[in-house]
Image (cartoon, rainbow, N blue to C red):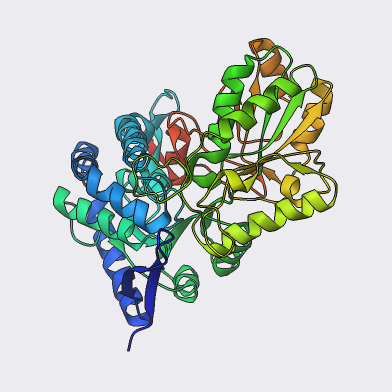
Amino acid sequence: MSELLKCISPVDGSVYVERPLASDSDIQKALDKSVAAQKSWRKVPISEKQAIVSKAVDYFVANKAAIAEEITWQIGRPISQAPGEIGGFEERARYMIKIAPESLADQNVGDKEGFTRFIRKEALGVVFVVAPWNFPLMTAVNCIVPALLAGNSVLLKHAAQTPLCAERFTEAFKAAGLPDGVFQHLHMSHAGAAKLIGSDGVDFVNFTGSVPAGHAIQKAASGRFIATGLELGGKDPGYVRADANVAHAIESLVDGAMFNSGQSCCGIERIYVHDSVYDDFVSGAVDLLKQYKLGNPTDPNTNLGPVVKTSAADFVRGQVAEAVKAGAQALIDPGYFAADKEGTPYLAPQLVVGVDHSMRVMNEESFGPVVGVMKVSSDEEAIKLMNDSEFGLTASIWTQDADAALAIGDDINTGTWFMNRCDYLDPALAWTGVKNSGRGCSLSKVAYEHLTRPKSFHLRTKI
């Protein structure tokens, strides 16, 4: 009997998907097939690659409603919001398809009498993508699409919570006419993934997930000279300056903290507000949070669903309880939300004040619908607090002074710096992190540099 993968839906606790896990033999066969398929795929003209990948994107768009419903049942995101995942997926994929020819073109290093010289970007080989559940399509597409366009073959391991997303990728590429073996998914255990990374055949690993899991990926790859791209989450801050449009800051930061029940790597997890606008910001944010509708995510009126599992809800409740015990105040009474129940993944939104950086809610990734808010008196204090974190994925400032935003941004240790927006990936910009948020890059032209290797051609044409 094969070991089984079980996706337990946070909607109602039922077993939503059940699949056998790949055996060692299954994994080796898939790897061998991927290695063989890549040899011919890398020689396919870029225009043909673009056409095939575009058709795969078309498949997702055409099946948006069904895929959105699957996402809702797998992770609990409200059906009112789940279709947006396909929209974000399409935006990123279409952009990476569009820029592929320019990004992958030979680099001319200048004329030299009697010589032809250039640098070519060659495919790495087999790219192993280990994708998370929280944004199951938008995270995976960041690497899958550019990897294929660069001439690599791809093996995908999706999180156990979102197996149907992996299967949708396979269906899409099959419908698009991608040659057999160029893309495959595998439902596998962590041990199986580690063994695959450590074996000959895989040439690059792209992983999105936790810091401990990132260390496990690096350890698995440590015996081989292959690169890894790691996106490991964050504790992303927002800073509301005295000159901010406070109403806009409230609307955007609350959404950035609560969308997907706070389960976003680049979601807002801590907010610093200038003392001159602090009271207005806090009261406005509390009023807005009380308008959220927590409940069954299959109900179109719901805009806050459950977190992924009960243990995740318990973790957030524990952070808040510890902060309150240490002197903080939780300003949202869970009683406003009938669906909030201990022992379930249904968790009311929460805003905590009177916090400091000794509290876990301000220094440890929460990954749930909670945000801490601190008062500051200057840009210098805000900069110090924003940088006081083991993470550095994104950070945002809310101000009407672009020059000040740029100057402050230069002093912030982060991969992306926003002004008057948050919790968004622009596919034209490099998606990267610093410190424990990881290393490497996806999206933008820069991503293609990570998914290829440079090969120099030095031809003497006159003897």
Q: Residue at x 54, y 63 (%)?
A: 310
**In the image, residue 166 above or below residue 51:** below
Q: Residue 308: horizontal and vertical position, in percent?
A: 49, 57
Q: Residue 136: horizontal and vertical position, in percent?
A: 40, 51
> Where does the C terminus fall, quadrant-wise?
top left
Front position in the image: 176 or 261: 261
> Where does the N terminus fall, quadrant-wise?
bottom left
Question: Does residue 126 show up?
Answer: no
Taking 293 as reference, is 276 left or right? right
Q: Residue at x 24, y 43 (%)?
A: 64
Taking 359 as reference, is 27 left or right? left
**In the image, residue 190 above or below residue 277:** below
**In the image, residue 372 above or below residue 280:** below
Total marks shown come to 0
Taking 40 as reference, is 321 left or right? right
Q: Residue at x 19, y 60 (%)?
A: 180
**In the image, residue 9 above or below residue 321:** below
Q: Residue 425: horizontal and vertical position, in percent?
A: 48, 34
Q: Residue 188: horizontal and vertical position, in percent?
A: 40, 72
Q: Residue at x 84, y 48 (%)?
A: 358
